[in-house]
């Protein structure tokens, strides 16, 4: 059957996350972006909502089965509040979710309960690299086998909380296949660079990380001796990015609607002009279209459908376009005011551009 | 629970309709495009027989809730069934699909606004021995989307208890077949009080053979040439009092009757979106097939910077197509679950009209000189596609409806 109705549990989670996004994230969003920093208590509070915990089985310290659909629903709500905060709150998941999806039983037992049952703590994953044609399936960072060890070399970009994280997951090309490796941050040969300055998400601490012949034990390969399939992890990255794009876009649309209904022009509200009303209608249609596509892809991933990878990719590319279109138009609807940093739309537009290239900073 | 599992009855129906599309539509697609106003009787006869045998493909509004053997109610999927049906038949040929016997839009209107007696009286003809057709006549030379400007009048002759209709309708899809090929009917929109504006608009059932109604012209069109688009003149055309859909009273300043008529569109707009998606899917499948023959594989999963222009186009087209289809399914799913859906219906129509025009235009472009040739069906689908963004409400009126919904505006607030 087709259904577009979330379960009661999902609705409760969405409500909880929406309240947090509304009452805690939104009020902090502007200053966090200006100051380049989020209050740690805010991040901890978000973590305690239990989004990851709800998606982790009891055996590993959580209270539910992994569900991409639930993850997508919760992520959209949180990103509506603030994008950098959403990535920050979900940082432990950046390390934990790939282990949950593809880790060996030993790895799951070793890492998941500590993370899931504990307070928020900085963990990370290093996927993105610094070149224009960066491709998660053709990484330049390499892993080579050397007896009981793997040797990792290369350079990563935009690694959230790299400086603070004690452990991170590093993705590298092993004989042409992308594989994850669990790497303690204080390992010899790891060099964390200066905090990166970006077009948007200023409040997120992210760093370039160099790996110079970093030797890790072969048991640290994600999934154990035989490694893992990367495609479902990549699909999850895409869907998380799509969900975040939905949240930011929804926020931008709502703000533009509210503004257009207040702003007077020529004796009427600017929203009463078709030139503006049609823009808003197209934004809303675009968001709804990408939302159902993202939901279907998440459902396909959850149910192990053959085309899930492709569908997640379609949702992701669609979401990147949607976010750019919607956030750009939100600025346009506000006119000159949209360009002023007192209004959040210019921030969302800067964030809107990022979805096309930032897949890999959060995963659900 | 959010899920996207295609219901089994739909899968079964799709399988059957794919056979129809492959065997009864595609082989004659070009012929009926080049021989405008010829009627595809083979398809019509086949569909009529099949509908009587299986109940599938009638284009009739979905029936009541079905129950399992143990008395448990099955989930309602009638509108979803219909959307899938239209998508598949339009994948076959949207012009020929529009010739499908059955009530079409006419019966949708009767189903939405008619009394049980009216439904019985007017809809049973579509299940009889000979095929019959139904049509909806709204547009006039001076009234399209702004249907409050309708000039066709309906005057009540109290003595004979009949309505007298006068006026001219244009752009009636299937109007000729409904009035001249079998025992069909046309729903005529007219005003019962020209001074009342919208509040005076009602719809009337005019059966084939009624004196005073005449088809005066068949349009020559850009696409969907297999389907007739008729002008209809009503000259002192008398119909029984009970042929009015909705209340015969004009209540001061209320547009309840008009809104009832307009509610039909909440159900039919996603169906037009479904036909758009069918044409778009046909186009994209053929395009990918030809590209594959040329040894071009689409590499899903690559960052855009590494894609070729053709790959990027095809991927965008797939994204647009799938999202438009899911919006459509959502709108009909809401209809099945009796959830009010005017916003979603219009969103589906906006998206459907947009993507089918973009996809067909792009496909012709990508195929270069081949795309422009009538050797392939791409140029036909390019022409067929455009109507999806026009009939059942243009993309613009549907944007207006979406805008009013998201802004919380009434018609008076946003014109």
Image: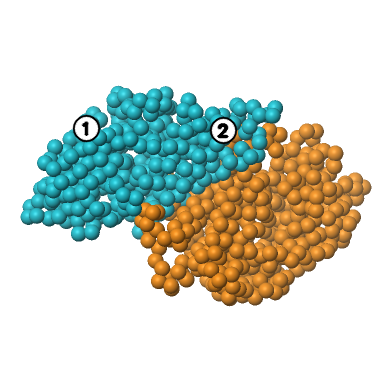
Chain colours: A cyan, B orange
Q: Which residue is drawn at 11% across and 41% down?
A: A188
| Quadrant of the drawing holding the N terminus of chain B | top left
Q: Residues within 10 Å of mark 1 (few under 14, many from 20)?
A: few
> Dot 1 lies on which element?
loop
- Residue A310, x across and y down, in percent: 38, 56
Left or right, A107 with respect to A244, comes to left
Residue with the mark numbered 1: A164
Q: In the image shown, does B25 or B107 lie closer to the viewer? A: B25
Q: How crowded is mark 2: few (under 14 residues within 10 Å), some or many (20 or more)?
A: few
Left or right, B206 with respect to B378, comes to right
Q: Residue at x 35, y 44 (%)?
A: A358
- Tag 1 subunit: A
- Residue B56, x across and y down, in percent: 58, 63
Q: In the image shown, does B155 or B230 lie closer to the viewer? A: B230
- Tag 2 subunit: A
- Residue B108, x across and y down, in percent: 67, 53
Chain-order first, disc 2 or disc 1: 1
Residue lying farthest to the right in this orientation: B159
Tell me, yes or no, if residue B348 can be seen here: yes
Residue with the mark numbered 2: A335
Q: In the figure, A322 relative to B316: above or below?
A: above
> Dot 2 lies on which element?
helix
Between marks 2 and 1 in the image, the one whose residue lies nearer the viewer: 2
Q: Residue at x 78, y 49 (%)?
A: B143
């Amino acid at each position: 059957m087709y259904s577009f109705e979330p379960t009661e549990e999902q609705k409760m989670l969405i409500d909880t996350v929406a309240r947090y996004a509304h009452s805690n994230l939104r009020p902090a969003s502007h200053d966090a972006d200006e100051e380049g920093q989020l209050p740690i208590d805010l991040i901890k509070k978000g973590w305690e909502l239990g989004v990851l915990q709800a998606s982790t089985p009891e055996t590993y310290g959580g209270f539910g089965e992994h569900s991409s659909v639930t993850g997508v629903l919760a992520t959209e709500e949180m990103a509506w509040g603030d994008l950098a905060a959403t990535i920050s709150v979900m940082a432990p998941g950046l390390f934990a979710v790939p282990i949950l999806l593809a880790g060996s039983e030993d790895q799951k037992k070793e890492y998941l309960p500590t993370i899931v049952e504990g307070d928020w703590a900085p963990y990370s994953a290093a996927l993105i690299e610094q070149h224009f044609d960066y491709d998660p399936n053709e990484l330049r960072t390499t892993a080579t086998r050397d007896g009981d060890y793997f040797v990792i070399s290369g350079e990563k970009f935009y690694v959230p909380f790299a400086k603070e994280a004690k452990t991170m997951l590093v993705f590298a090309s092993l004989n042409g296949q992308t594989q994850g490796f669990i790497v303690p941050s204080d390992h010899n040969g790891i060099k964390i660079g200066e905090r990166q300055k970006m077009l948007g998400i200023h409040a997120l601490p992210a760093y370039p990380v160099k790996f110079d012949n970093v030797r890790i034990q072969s048991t640290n390969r994600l999934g154990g001796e035989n490694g893992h399939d990367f495609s479902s992890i990549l699909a999850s990255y895409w869907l998380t990015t799509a969900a975040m794009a939905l949240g930011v876009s929804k926020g931008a649309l709502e703000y533009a609607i509210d503004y257009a209904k207040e702003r007077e022009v020529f004796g009427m509200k600017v929203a009463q002009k078709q030139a503006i009303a049609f823009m808003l209608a197209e934004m809303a249609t675009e968001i709804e279209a990408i939302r159902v596509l993202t939901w279907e892809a998440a459902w396909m991933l959850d149910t192990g459908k053959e085309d899930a990878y492709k569908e997640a990719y379609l949702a992701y590319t669609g979401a990147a376009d949607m976010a750019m279109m919607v956030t750009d138009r939100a600025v346009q609807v506000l006119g000159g005011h949209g360009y002023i940093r007192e209004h959040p739309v210019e921030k969302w537009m800067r964030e809107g551009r990022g979805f096309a290239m930032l897949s890999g900073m959060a995963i659900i | 629970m959010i899920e996207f599992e295609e219901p089994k009855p739909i899968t079964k129906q799709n399988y059957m309709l794919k056979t129809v599309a492959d065997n009864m539509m595609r082989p004659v697609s070009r012929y009926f495009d080049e021989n405008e106003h010829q009627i595809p009787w083979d398809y019509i006869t086949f569909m009529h027989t099949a509908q009587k045998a299986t109940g599938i493909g009638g284009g009739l509004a979905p029936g009541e809730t079905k129950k399992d053997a143990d008395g448990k109610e099955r989930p309602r999927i009638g509108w979803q069934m219909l959307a899938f049906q239209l998508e598949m038949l339009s994948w076959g040929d949207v012009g020929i699909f529009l010739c499908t016997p059955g009530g079409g839009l006419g019966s949708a209107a009767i189903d939405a606004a008619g009394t049980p007696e009216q439904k019985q009286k007017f809809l049973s003809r579509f299940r009889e021995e000979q095929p019959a057709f139904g049509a909806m006549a709204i547009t006039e030379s001076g009234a399209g989307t702004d249907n409050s400007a309708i000039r066709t009048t309906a005057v009540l002759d109290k003595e004979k208890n009949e309505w007298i209709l006068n006026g001219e309708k244009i752009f009636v899809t299937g109007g000729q077949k409904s009035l001249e090929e079998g025992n069909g009917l046309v729903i005529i929109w007219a005003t019962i009080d020209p001074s009342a504006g919208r509040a005076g608009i009602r719809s009337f059932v005019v059966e084939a053979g009624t004196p005073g109604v005449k088809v005066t012209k068949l349009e020559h069109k850009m696409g969907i040439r297999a389907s007739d688009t008729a002008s209809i003149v009503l000259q002192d055309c008398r119909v029984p009092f009970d042929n009015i859909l909705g209340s015969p009273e004009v209540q001061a300043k209320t547009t309840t009757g008009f809104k009832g008529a307009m509610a039909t569109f909440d159900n039919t707009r996603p169906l037009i979106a479904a036909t758009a998606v069918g044409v778009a899917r046909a186009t994209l499948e053929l395009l990918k097939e030809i590209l594959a023959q040329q040894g071009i594989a689409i590499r899903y999963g690559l960052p855009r910077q590494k894609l070729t222009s053709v790959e990027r186009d095809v991927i965008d087209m797939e994204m647009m197509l799938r999202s438009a289809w899911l919006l459509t399914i959502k709108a009909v799913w809401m209809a099945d679950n009796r959830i009010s859906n005017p916003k979603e219906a219009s969103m589906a129509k906006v998206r459907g009209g947009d993507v089918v025009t973009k996809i067909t235009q792009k496909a012709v472009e990508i195929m270069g000189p081949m795309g422009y040739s009538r050797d392939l069906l791409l140029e036909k689908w390019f022409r067929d596609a455009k109507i999806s963004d026009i009939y059942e409400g243009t993309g613009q009126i549907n944007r207006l409806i979406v805008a009013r919904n998201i802004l919380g505006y009434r018609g008076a607030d946003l014109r």
